Image (cartoon, rainbow, N blue to C red):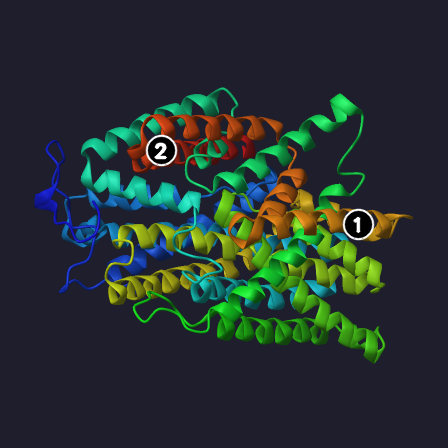
Amino acid sequence: MHGSQLPEHRPPGTTASFIQTAPCASQRHPSALNPSTLLLLAVLGVIGAIIGIELLVRVGVTPNTSIVGALAAMICARVPLRWFRAYRSVHVQNLAQSAISAATFGAANSLLLPIAIPFLFGREDLIVPMFAGVALGMLLDGYMLYRLFNTSVFPASGAWPHGVAAAEAIKAGDQGGRQARLLGAGIVMGLTGSWLGIPMSAFGTAFIGNVWALGMLGIGLLLRGYATPLFHFDISKALIPHGMMIGAGLVALIQVGVLVLRDRNPPARATRTPAIASSLRFGGIAYLVLAALVALLSGLWGEMSPGMLAAFVLYAAAAAFAHELIVGIAAMHSGWFPAFAVALITLLIGMLIGFPAVSLVMLCGFSAATGPAFADMGYDLKAGFILRGHGQDPAFELAGRRQQLIAAMLAFVIAIPVVLLAYRGLFAKGLIPPVARVYVSTIQAGVAPGILHALLVWAVAGAALQWAGGPKRQLGVLFATGLLIASPFAGWALMVGIGMRLVIGRLRPGAKSRMEVFAAGVIAADALTGFCGSLIKSR
C-alpha cells in the first residue's frame, strides 16, 4: 500500500488489512505507553536483552532481532482475546520490533562489551564507572539518531536495508496478496542460500542500497578475503583498513559539516526533528559532559596531568561522536556497521597520542558503546517511516517517530538492570565478549614501530576516495568497511546481487519496488536464520 490509499482500493487478490498502513486525517498513532502495548514492549525488552548478551559472549555476534519482535506481535495479534486486539496494528508491531532490537544491541554492544574491557584488564574497580558512562551514552546514542533521522545527513530515503526488510515483512503479514508472495519468494531464497552458507543479507542489500557505495563495499570485502591466499599479503596486519577508515572517516565528518552549512533553510513541510546544526551541537556538548564524567568517576584525574586529562576528555568525546556518525553512515548505506573495528581505530589513535593504559581502557569502552544503538535506531525508524506512508502526513510521521523513541528508550532502560544482574555470573564463568580480548591485548601490546607511518599513508588514500565519491556515495567509508570485515563470500553475494539488479533494471525499468520487496524477504530470512543459528551454537 502506498500513500493514503485505503484498504478497499487494494488490487485484486489481496486480503483485508487489520488497519490501514498509511495515515488518514483522523488517525492517531498508537501509544507505546498503552497498557497492553507497554506489557508487550517490556517482555520483548527483557527477552531481547537476554538474547543479546547470551549470543555475544557465546558466539561473538549480536543478531538483528527486529524481525523476531515483529513476528511476536503478529502471533499475539491472532489470539482471539480483546487484550491482544491492539497488536493487530502494524504500528504497534513496529513498536515491538523497535523495542526488542534496541534491547538486544543496547545490552550486548553498548553495556556488556565495554565493561568486559576493564574486567579483562584486571581493574574491576573501573566496571561501575564504565557502566555509568556507557549506560548514559547508550541513551544519548538512540536519542541522537532520533534527532538526526530524515535530515540531509541521515535521510529517510536512505537505504537502511534491515529497516526495509522489517517494514515489508510487517506489511506482507497485514496485507497479503502479491506483496506477500514476493516477500515469501525472497524468504524461500534467503533460507536456501543461508542453509548453503551464503551471506544472503549481503545479496538482498544489493537490491536496496546505493550501487556505488555497495560496489565499493563488495570490492573491499573481496580484497580483504583474497589478498592473503593470492598475494601472500595480509591487508589487516599492514593496517591498510585502519588507515583507510581514518582518512575516509575524517573526510566524512567534514562532509557532514558542509551539509550542516547547507541545511540552514530546511523545507517548511518537512517531517524532521530539530535541525542538523542544533542536533550536532547538542550531541557534541553531551558527549563532552559524559567523557568528563567517565574521567571523574574512574579517578583518571589522579593519574594524569591537567593538560593530558583535558586532552583525554576532548579526544574521548570526539572519538565517541565520530564513531557514532561513521557507524551510522555505513549502516544506512549498506546494512553493515563495523563498530568493533572503528572502536579499535580510535584506540590505536589514542595509543599514538600517548594516553596511559588505564585511560585507554576507559576510552575504548566509551567509544565502543556508541554506534550500534545509533545504527539500529535508524533501521527501526526507516521501518516506521515506510509503514506510516513515507511521511505523507508529517504530523502522523513525527508522532510515530516519538512513540518509537519511547519504545526504544524503554528497552534501553530495561537492558540496564538485566546486564547488571547478569555480568558477574557470566564473567565468573569466563564468558567474555571475544572482541573485548582483542581490545585488551592491543592495549597491552603497545604501539608497534612504523604504525604511525602506515596509518598516515593509507589515511591519505582513504580521504581521497571518500572525497571523490562525495557525501551521497560514501565510497571511502564503505570501501574501508569492506577491508575491515573478513567475509569474501559476502563480497561475492553483494557483487552478484548488484549485477542482477542492473540487468533487471535495464530489462524491466519499473521493477524497482518489486525487487526491494523480494530483497526484503531475503534479508529477513537471513536475519532469522542467523538468529536461530546463533541460538543453536550458544547451546
Q: Amino acid at mark 1?
A: Leu
Mark 2 or mark 1: name the one nearer the start of the chain: 1
In this view, which residue lies farthest toward the right?
449
Residue in the image at 29% along x and 54% along y: 390
Label 1 belongs to which residue?
Answer: 455
Residue shown at 58%/34% (left/top)? 218
Q: Secondary structure at mark 2?
A: helix
> Residue 192 vs residue 468: left or right?
left
Q: How far across and how far down the image is residue 170, in percent?
A: 28, 43
Q: Tell me, for residue 521, which label it has, or none.
A: 2
**Location of residue 212 with respect to 186 vertically, above or below:** below
- Left or right of 467: which side holds 143? left
Say if 12 sits above or below 321 in the image: above
Q: Dot 1, how many residues are within 10 Å of its Cα: few (below 14), some (14-19), or many (20+)?
A: many
Residue at horizontal 54 percent and vertical 62 percent from the top: 138
Residue 343 in the image, given as x and y percentages of width and height: 67, 53
Q: Nearer the viewer, residue 123 or 245?
A: 245
**Marks 2 and 1, how far apart in space?**
40 Å
Placement of the C terminus among the 4 image quadrants? top right
Percent x, y of residue 356: 84, 64
Res 526 seen here: yes
Residue 34 visible in the picture? no
Q: Nearer the viewer, mark 2 or mark 1?
A: 1
Q: Nearer the viewer, residue 184 or 473?
A: 473
Question: Which residue sits furthest left?
Answer: 8
Q: Amino acid at mark 2?
A: Gly
Q: Quadrant of the N terminus?
A: top left
Q: Residue at x 33, y 65 (%)?
A: 271
Disc number for residue 25: none
Q: Nearer the viewer, residue 364 or 151?
A: 151
Query: Looking at the picture, how far across and down is residue 317, in whole percent?
Result: 66, 69
Q: Helix, strand, or loop for circle 1? A: helix
